[in-house]
Image (tube, grey):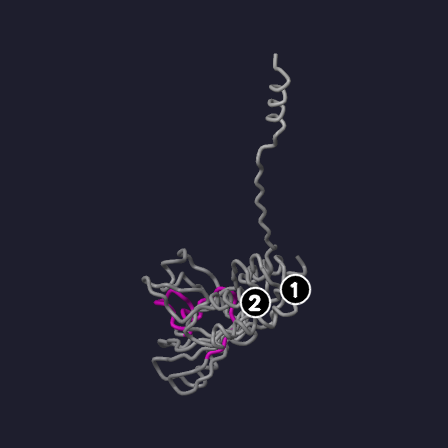
Amino acid sequence: ALDADERAALASILTTSPPVRVDVKCAREPVYLAFRYRKLGRRTPQSSWVVDGRVKGVGSVEEYVCKAAKAVADCDGVKFAASGREDWDVRMLGNGRPAYAELQNCRKWSSTDVVGDFAREVAKASNGVVEALHVEIADKARADAVNASAETKVKTYACVVWFSADRSAEDARRVSASAPLAVQQRTPVRVMHSRSLATREKRVLRLKLTMTNPRFGVLELDTSAGMYIKEFVHGDLGRTEPSLASLAGCDADILQLDVLDVHDDVAAASSSS
């Protein structure tokens, strides 16, 4: 049997609480900024583009957006996404391309200041090459709507084109009258390394070819989502049919390309979800 001192010593051991460590980490829910961006230069890709270990282009839309978001919200990270993408040497004009930024764990936040500050910071980071328009606070549904719209949007383009033979104003009218038309596009040669091989049907909804002289013209067109415009112009070694070249009856090539408008209704898609 234990004596009184032994019982007291044992009781003190049994009633002593073990040491407890509690780690608390506080973080905010992600905040979404919805906007449309315009890209006014021909040397800036949408996201960082590395070819053979070398970065191609000057900066990127994603880089400028992330830098601006961190400047206005002091957040841990930023995820950027857009409704489709344009090539690095293609300008994005008109009403801009729908996009959003997901800001993770913002340390400073004032909804009244962020909208204007974000647009200014994007312009500052890009030296005016990229503009953020119609910036607003959004939610996850709005972000999902931006992603979904990439498969449904119609885009308007304008490009400067060259022909290997003289084409007349009457030839231009004949080409313009061929729309609307269905176009069969096999995976373009320039993206075969990253895209699955397939033939996809796209649609040209409107064509307007205006000759500036017998060998050069300006082509405006409205197309369905996902159409490769450069390949539609030159035909991509017969992988796109019909093409501007086949419609004009001679070789053709594209010298400059702009996206004039991205037609969609992202806001409506979000509100109806």
Label 2 crowd bin: few (<14), some (14–19), many (20+), radius 10 Å: many
Whether residue 146 sits left or right of residue 192 in the image: it is right
Give the residue type at disc 1. Ala
Whether residue 40 is in magenta: the answer is: no
Name the secondary structure under disc 2: helix
Asked whether the beta carbons under mark 2 and mark 1 sit within 8 Å of each other, the answer is no
Which residue sits at x=39%, y=56%? 197
The answer to which quarter of the image holds residue 166 is bottom left
Name the secondary structure under disc 1: helix
| Extreme residue in the right direction | 272
Residue 33 seen by the camera? yes
Residue topped by disc 1: 268
Foreground mark, 2 or 1, reads: 2
Can you give x and y, in whole percent of width and height, for residue 62 in the image? 48, 65
Whether residue 8 sits left or right of residue 84 in the image: it is right
Which residue sits at x=62%, y=20%? 5
Residue topped by disc 2: 72
Is 10 located above or below residue 174 in the figure? above
Q: Quadrant of the N terminus?
A: top right
Look at the image and give the residue range highlighted in magenta. Answer: 219-244
Q: Measure the alpha-carbon separation of dots 2 and 1.
A: 28 Å
Give the residue type at disc 2. Val
Can you give x and y, in whole percent of width and height, for residue 265 in the image? 62, 66
Residue 243 seen by the camera? no
Q: Quadrant of the C terminus?
A: bottom right
Can you give x and y, in whole percent of width and height, for residue 160 in the image? 42, 80
The disc, 2 or 1, on the residue closer to the chain's N-terminal end is: 2
Question: Depth check: 58 or 95 in front?
Answer: 58
Question: Depth check: 3 or 54 in front?
Answer: 3
Whether residue 42 sits left or right of residue 148 in the image: it is left
**Count of numbered badges drawn on the protein:** 2
Can you give x and y, in whole percent of width and height, for residue 73 in the image? 57, 64
